[in-house]
Amino acid sequence: MTAAALASLAALLADRTRVEICLALLDGRAWTAGELARHAGVTASTASGHLDRLIAGGLLAEERAGRHRYVRLADPDVAQLLEDLVVRLDPAPGPVASLRAANRSAALARARTCYDHLAGQLGVAIADALTRRGYLHQKHGFALTDAGVDWLTGTLGVDAGALHRTRRPVARGCLDWTERRPHLAGSAGREICQRLLDRRWVERLSGTRAVQVTPAGRVALADMFGQPFSATI
C-alpha cells in the first residue's frame, strides 16, 4: 500500500455526504440512489456524483434493476473499516439537536445491525450469553466452540456449510462503538442475525439501521439462553 493510495482512500471518507451514505449502508441492505440522496439531504445529481466516487474507490458496489440503481457496501471488510473508524471517535456525546435525534441515537445504542450482524446492547448481550453457555470463547479472540456449532445448526437450523462458504472467519469480535465491548461478527454473527429477523424475533425500525426485539423474540431469547433479556433492549 503506497502513501498515495492510502491518501486516496482517506479522501473518499473526507466528505460528510459520502460518510452519511456509507453509514446508512451499514444496515447491510442495498439502497437506491434516490433513497440515499434523501437520507443525506442532497440533490439526486449530487448524490450520484458521490456514489460514482465511492464505487470507483471500491467502497461501494452497484447493481442495476431496470431503471433503478442500487448500491451497497462492497463487502464485509468495508463495514469493518467503517465501524473501526467510528470506534476511534470521542465517546463523549455531543449536544442533542432534537428529541427525534435523541430517540434515534438511543434506538441505535439499544440494538442495530452492523452490516449483517447485530450490534449495540443486544449484540453484546447475545455475545455474552453465548459465552456463558459455552458456545463462544472470548478470551483470546472470538472462537465458536463445538457446542456453539451444534447450537447454531440444531437450535437455529443454520447450514453448517454456510459458516465456511466465504473467506470470512466463522466468529470475529467486532468492537461495538456504543458499548465499547465486542459483539459477534463473522459468518456466525451473520447467520444469527438473519435467523432472528426471519423468525421475527427481531424487526427493523423504518428509516434507520436500528432494530428492536419483538415480544415473541424476548420470550424466545430467554428460553434459548436461560435468562431474561432486559426490557430496555
Image: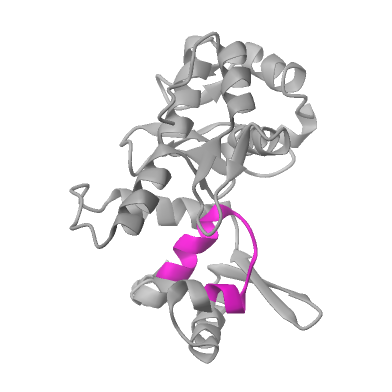
118 left or right of 224 in image: left
Q: Would residue 57 be seen by someone viewing this image from the given angle?
A: no
* Residue placed furthest toward the bottom: 45
Task: Verify whether residue 29 appears in magenta.
Answer: yes
Is 128 positioned to the left or the right of 197 in the image?
left
Q: Is residue 141 magenta?
A: no
In the rendered image, residue 12, in percent from the top left (x then y), is placed at 41, 75
Write the residue at 57% across / 69% down: 60
Vertical arrangement, residue 213 with respect to residue 79, above or below: above
Q: Main secondary structure of the magenta part?
A: helix
Q: Position of residue 167 (x, y in %)?
A: 65, 44
Q: Residue at x 40, y 29 (%)?
A: 232
Location of the C terminus (image quadrant): top left
In the rendered view, tell whether residue 52 sits above or below residue 2: below
Residue drawn at (56%, 15%), measured in percent from left and top? Answer: 222
Which of the pair 231/7 is nearer the observer?
231
- Quadrant of the rendered image containing residue 71: bottom right
The residue nearer to you, when weighing 58 against 153, is 153
Say which residue appears at 56% left-offset and 41% top-offset.
117
1 lies above or below 189: below
Q: Vertical placement of 98 versus 68: above or below? A: above
The number of callouts visible is 0
In the image, the segment drawn in magenta is: 20-36
Indicate the quadrant containing the N terminus: top left, top right, bottom left or bottom right.
bottom left
Instruction: Tell me if I can see residue 144 in this picture.
Output: yes
The type of colouring in the image is one colour
What is the x, y in percent for residue 217?
A: 61, 26
Q: Nearest the camera: 84 or 222? A: 222
Question: Percent position (x, y) of residue 150?
Answer: 71, 15
